[in-house]
Amino acid sequence: MMQNALIFGDAIAAATNFVVTAGTCANLSNLADRRLAQAADITMSGSGTFSARIDFPPMLVNYAAALDIRNKQVGSGISISLSFYDAPGGTLLGSSSLASYSGLPTTSATPFTSFDDIGDGTPVTAGSVTITAFGLNSGSYSIGRLFAGIGETIEIAEGWELAVRERATVQRNRGAQTVRRAGRRFREISTEIVGLDWSTFSPAGASLHSRLTDAGVDPEVALILRMETAGPPVSKPIPVAGIVKQPISPRPLADGFVSLPLTITESL
Amino acid sequence: VTAYAFPTGAFLAFGNKIPGATMTLSSSGMSSASFASTLPISNVQAAPLARVARLSATAGAAGSPYVQIRAAFASTAAHKIRAVGILGHNIPLSGADALTVRLFATNAFGIEQANYQVGGIAAPEPVFANHLVLLLPSTYQTGSIAFEIPFAPSASATYDIGGLWASDAIVVDAGADARSVALSEVDASADLRSIGEQSYTRHGGKLRVVSAAFSQLTEEQAVGTPSSGLANFLSVASEHGTTSEVIFCPTVGGSVDAMRRTLVHGLLTPTGDRVLAIRKGKGANYSTAITVTEER
């Protein structure tokens, strides 16, 4: 079942070791760097398998997400799953079946995203993850970003706003015509978490409020938005992985409930 | 050939494939057909040079002579084409004159997928840029395109070919979705006075600004679902931003006149540093607003 979710504390971004164990992948370690993530490419030949191991310092995880997977070839398809271990080559703690999609029609197709809990969603202390991708068709894929951390499902307001911002340089040439040079683009989502009560803001370290506040300007937080219309679940959510805009200011509502306006800014 | 009927509705075309194509000239039944050497066919590929590619041709005495301006895309991978057109041309399309656009499945002009012919339309009024953009009834996976201009036997003519366009497009249904369309003409010229109190004019750019707000967009149109692969506002803003040419027509209105009066070829104009914002209301109900500025 797809729900809205927030994931904190990205294990992949903290990774220390990247090993390709089967198949071909260029720049696997780019997965750990949000500025380079679109440039980790795997190439699938027919229904082949790609796998790789990513080690990170022991960390609590219960949700994983693959954000903005793009195919680079007409008609290609892929299936991705992650398996978490307590240490490199250690005991399997849980798996997450992230994404499966075939027949993306063009190279410029909308990237797709998937997220899943690990095992039954109970947090586990993992130190290594194995990524396995099955090619449904031959093709080249940009994995986009992998994200794994402590997540929780949230209820958000019906309305939200997703803006694309760009810092372009604007100049004028001698003919007084505008010349624009592309700048960095980033998405920004503004929404409101609803259905909270004051226990969410208790001083315990694991409260939603303290996690959002602790997220500060870094590390990133991933917000996965559930979509409304029916369709293949892997294709539905909109992901925004980025920086939580501070301060986090809860708004008391009637009946003891609280809502939490939330803005997350992401680099593209 | 299929007579083209102007649809209703609005569209935003983005990611022109012509600049990356191989351009050639082909003809049948003509005694001569060539581009001026100083105003070559390659000018149609560069926005700053478009409108200065000049075709001169003389037809043979018999048959059905024609000239084709051909664009073959870079690889055998098909490109999604939904909007094709000629921007700022001076080909008369009234009376018996016509333009036929032919789409082919491969980049070798092999199997013809579809063709559409526009002709018998009123000459444009000078105040409007002579853009002619055909919003195709469906999206084609296309490898090459030919823009075909027929000639009467023994006729000869010289045409300025404006910029050529072929790309994917977001299509929004008529009426129900397009709200508060605004068209404006901006003249940025400055009227200055010298120390001697004599006035002189510094000519600035003339701008055409078209904005429109869309409501009741589907999830697919607003943020996209990859299962369909259809273009959406979020991916256009993310991938093309404000620095890549687009064509925006807030209403085709079922006629060439409505299209000519509202269609602009320019850049998405940001509000502050926002290219655009997509808002979700209750349920799967999305809205957004865009502004496109065309500089003359």
Image (spheres, coloured by chain):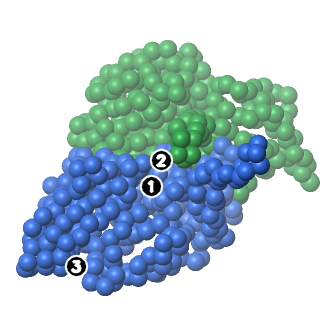
Chain colours: A green, B blue
Residue at mark 2:
B244
What is the secondary structure assignment of the residue under circle 2?
A: loop
Q: Looking at the image, is mark 3 or mark 2 earlier in the sequence? A: 3
Side (left or right) of A217 relative to B86:
right
Residue visible at 35% across and 38% down in the picture: A141
Tag 1: Cα neighbours inside 10 Å, few (<14), some, or many (≥20)?
many
Q: Is residue A220 above or below residue B160?
A: above
Percent x, y of residue A83: 45, 30
Side (left or right) of A105 relative to A254:
left
Q: Residue B14's mark?
A: 1
Chain for mark 1? B
Q: Residue B1's mark?
A: 3
Chain for mark 2? B
Identified by mark 3, the residue type is Val
Q: Is residue A21 above or below residue B17?
A: above
Percent x, y of residue B110: 14, 61
Whether residue A96 is visible to the viewer of this picture, yes or no, is no
Identified by mark 2, the residue type is Ser
**Distance of label 3 from label 1 (alpha carbons):** 27 Å
Q: Are marks 3 and 1 on the same chain?
A: yes
**Distance of label 3 from label 2 (alpha carbons):** 33 Å
Residue visible at 33% across and 27% down in the picture: A25
Tag 3: Cα neighbours inside 10 Å, few (<14), some, or many (≥20)?
few
Q: Looking at the image, is mark 1 or mark 2 earlier in the sequence? A: 1
Tag 2: Cα neighbours inside 10 Å, few (<14), some, or many (≥20)?
some
Q: Are marks 1 and 2 in contact (CB under 8 Å)?
A: yes
Residue visible at 40% across and 62% down in the picture: B87
